Structure formats: C-alpha cells, structure tokens
Amino acid sequence: MDPAGVLPQAAERLDADASPQRRHPSEIHLDVSTLNVDSASMRQLAEANGHDPVRVGEAIAHIVAARGKLHNPVTGSGGMLLGRVAYVGQDARDTARRAGVAEGDRVATLVSLTLTPLSLRRIVAVHLDTHQVDVSGTAIVFASGMLARMPDDLPERLALGALDVAGAAPQVLRLAAAGQSVLILGAGGKSGLLAGSAARRRVGATGRVVGIEPHPAAAAAARRVGCFDAVVEADARDAVACLRALDAVVGGADFDLTVSCVNVDAAEMTAILATRPRGRVYFFSMATSFARAALGAEGVSRDVDMLVGNGYCEGHAEATLALLRDDAALRDELTRRFSA
Ligand code: NAP
C-alpha cells in the first residue's frame, strides 16, 4: 500500500485484509495461532518494554496494526508463524502441492514476517524466553512464498523454532569441509546449536568446532549438546577479549569458517579477526551491519569472503528437521527449551 509499487519486504505498509471477499487466486490464507518472533527483534522489543510481556504484546499489536506485517522498524527483522491453511487460491496450488499441504493442515511459513500480510485480532500470550507469541489472526502467503507442513513426530513449538532458523545448518553443511575448523558466535542459541551440530557432522573427527557464548548457562547448554570441542565464555562484541580467550583455550584464532549466530549488534569484528586470510565468514545474524563488516575488514586488511545469511536454501526445512531427528542431544536440549 505504501510506497506504491514497492515489493512487500521493502514496503512500509501492506494490505492484510484476508476476509473471504478479498481472496485472490494467487494467495494462500492462514488462520494464525503463533508468531515465532525473530530473536534480534524480540530482544529489542523486550529491552524497549522493560521485559514486560504485556507491553511487548502491545508493541507487537501496534506494529502489525500500523504496517500490516510484523516488521520491526528498529531491527528490520520479522520471524515466521504457525497457522492452519484456510484457503488455497487456484494459482497458488503448486506452492501448496510442493509443500505437501492442503486446506486444514497445520503449517509454518518459511518466508519472513517482514513480507507476510498479517492481521491480529488478539494477542493471547507472550513467551519472552522462547520468542513465541500466541495470537489469533490471519495471514496471507503469496504463491511465490513457501510453507512447511508441521511434522507429526516433533513437538510443534520445537519444530517452529527450528524452522525459523532453517537457513543456518544446511548452509554450514555446504560451506564447511572435512578436517576444517569452524567458529560459531552465539553457540548456545537455536541457530548456534544447529550450526554447531551441522559443522561437527561436516568437519568430522579431524576438524575442530569451537563456540563463543557469553552467558555461563547458555555455554553449559552448548557443551551438553556435545558438538563443540570447546565453548569459550566471551562477549562477541569485544573482539580483543574474544581473540585472547580463543588463544588461551584453543591456542589461536585462524578459523576456516566463522558463523555469526548472535542476536546483538557489533559482533562483526570478532568474526572477521578470528577467520584466517581467505577464510569465510557467514553472517547469519540479523543484527549484522554491512557497513561495519565491509569497512571493518578493510580497516584491518583482512581478506575474507563474507556471506549474507540467506534465510533460504533448497531443502532447508527438511534438512533442519532431519538434523533434529538425527542428533538426540541437540533435540533434547531444544525440546527442554521449548517446553519450559
Ligand atoms: P537465539 O536462539 O536467541 O540465539 C542467540 C544467541 O546469541 C544466544 O545464545 C545469546 O545468548 C547469544 N548472544 C547474545 N549476546 C551475545 C554476545 N555478546 N556474544 C556472543 N553471543 C551472544 O537466536 P536465533 O534464533 O538462533 O537467531 C540468531 C540470529 O539469527 C539472530 O540475529 C536472528 O535475528 C538471526 N536470524 C537470521 C535469519 C536469516 O535468515 N539470516 C533467520 C532467522 C534468524 P543469551 O541468550 O545467553 O543472551
């Protein structure tokens, strides 16, 4: 709706009217029950609202009412949602068929809430710890979008949380190679654990997987999962402290691949400085600044390949759920988190 002609992600405001008389053949309509808010967004909303679930809920309702989508104006990020398919338009049938979904099925959206027309009737409950918000509302998925049928063999909240970060682990599987060293920033979070598990599988016994996580409880959780050779307790925003800690714990910082999974800003320099020349940095974190990364790398003359964390890669949902099924320690840790 505003500005005219702009595609949905970049738009300020979308038309989120999903009433039956507004159904379009290229749309899939969902009855929405839970929003899985992007970690960087939920952290910002919680901090700005005194960690009060009621005020956070009001802030979310306000954004959605103003923009027709949950597109946090501060972080620029969204999340994804869980709902039930209410309508599949004629021209969106291929999209539904590819996902194996039909009207009545429980599904997660695999495209960002920053481009998903959303209308909320009610906020039911805000779970600050898991970043999930129970709601009643409607959403529209375009034929160009993507859905995943909720699996029957995994708890729904766990699957939803993992699908939100489905782009992380499969791309680590692509980027790492046997025998290499991989560093994960934010190793105790959802994407950090999934990326760590994927890295372990790819680099094998001769490779090395190291995590950085500042909070002892989250670091302990990462150690429990067992995919890391070491988890260093340090703040990824403090590059000098991280390099010193890595030096002390693993004897240096020259990783082949560094993956940033933090939900805070200003972690770019740790990722860049910990990566060997011609190594690769994968910025999955939504709190990454292109300017800080590009100018920061230039400023220390570090020739590393920097990749933007694409939320999508082919087969990402299936690969992420397969990893959860295959890694019992990872599944147990995340199940505990999502059932708390
Ligand atoms: P998460 O579960 O909240 O994990 C974030 C982790 O970072 C937490 O373990 C957190 O620790 C840790 N952390 C916080 N401050 C840190 C610091 N200063 N140094 C090191 N670690 C720190 O989040 P997630 O769902 O995995 O998401 C991670 C990032 O990916 C977010 O930025 C999110 O927006 C982004 N994301 C990207 C895409 C994409 O398509 N590229 C899609 C989804 C999400 P504590 O919890 O102990 O504070």
Image (cartoon, rainbow, N blue to C red):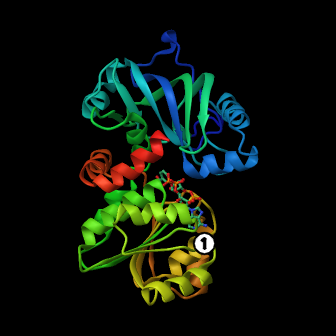
Q: Nearer the viewer, residue 131 or 170?
A: 131
Q: Is residue 19 visible?
A: yes
The residue where tag 1 is placed is: 235
Q: Is mark 1 within 8 Å of ligand 1?
A: yes
Q: Is residue 2 left or right of residue 36?
A: right
Q: Quadrant of residue 68?
A: top right
The amino acid beneath tag 1 is Asp
Q: Which residue is drawn at the image coordinates 50% and 25% (left, top)? A: 33
- Quadrant where the N terminus sits is top right
Is residue 7 visible in the rendered image? The answer is no
Q: Is residue 133 above or below residue 289?
A: above
Mark 1 surroundings: few (<14), some (14-19) or many (≥20) residues within 10 A: some
* Element on which disc 1 rests: loop
Q: Position of residue 169 (x, y in %)?
A: 35, 58
Q: Residue at x 59, y 24 (%)?
A: 119
In the image, is residue 60 above or below residue 193?
Answer: above
- To which quarter of the image does residue 15 belong? top right
The residue sitting at 57% across, 58% down in the picture is 263
Residue in the picture at 40% in, 41% down: 158
Which residue is more in the foreground, 287 or 19? 287
